[in-house]
Amino acid sequence: MRVEIMRQFWNTAEKSVASAAYIKRTHYDAERERNVRLAQVRYMDGQWMRMAFAYVPDQIEFDDIEKGAIVDFISEPVPLVNFATYQVTRILKLVCRAKDLTCIHREISEGRFSKVVDADPGDVSIKYGVAYNRRNTPEDNAKYKTRR
């Protein structure tokens, strides 16, 4: 789905709290998820505006996805979420930088914004050439200064 970035950076340096059931069902490991690179996206789900945190691929810098940028992202159905295999909500590619108003206008006017643009992404690591191994650094945390 083609969506808008609402927050380019989310500080995940602190330990998160998840229920035992969630941990078991999603293979969540708080230590593995520490400092994972996340951004917040906004999208329409039918009539409802939704917000989600999405993994940022290693290939995209936070400076490239300022608030207002347009990206393609994938959201896994809840029963399929698996943190161990990165089968989670994640960004696939940058479409328009926030300051590229021509690109943003084109996406909106051509009806691609907040729409499914790839109904069968398959193995995204191959098709989109993305990996999600990079972690936030102390410098990232200091530079973007966002609350957890």
Image: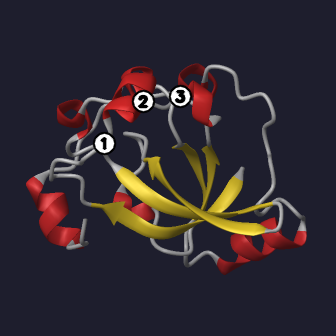
Label 1 crowd bin: few (<14), some (14–19), many (20+), radius 10 Å: few
Could you tell me which residue is drawn at 55 percent across and 62 percent down?
41
| Mark with earlier residue (1, 3) | 1
Q: Could you give the CA–CA distance between mark 1 and mark 3, rounded to whole angstroms?
A: 30 Å
| Tag 3 secondary structure | loop
Q: Position of residue 105 (x, y in %)?
A: 77, 76
| Mark with earlier residue (1, 2) | 1
Q: Nearer the viewer, residue 73 or 34?
A: 34
117 lies above or below 138: above
Q: Which mark is residue 82?
A: none
Label 3 crowd bin: few (<14), some (14–19), many (20+), radius 10 Å: few
Residue type at numbered disc 1: Ala
Q: Nearer the viewer, residue 90 or 106?
A: 90
Residue type at numbered disc 3: Gly
> Which residue position holds label 2?
131
> Which residue position holds label 1?
18
Residue type at numbered disc 2: Ala
Q: Nearer the viewer, residue 130 or 54?
A: 54
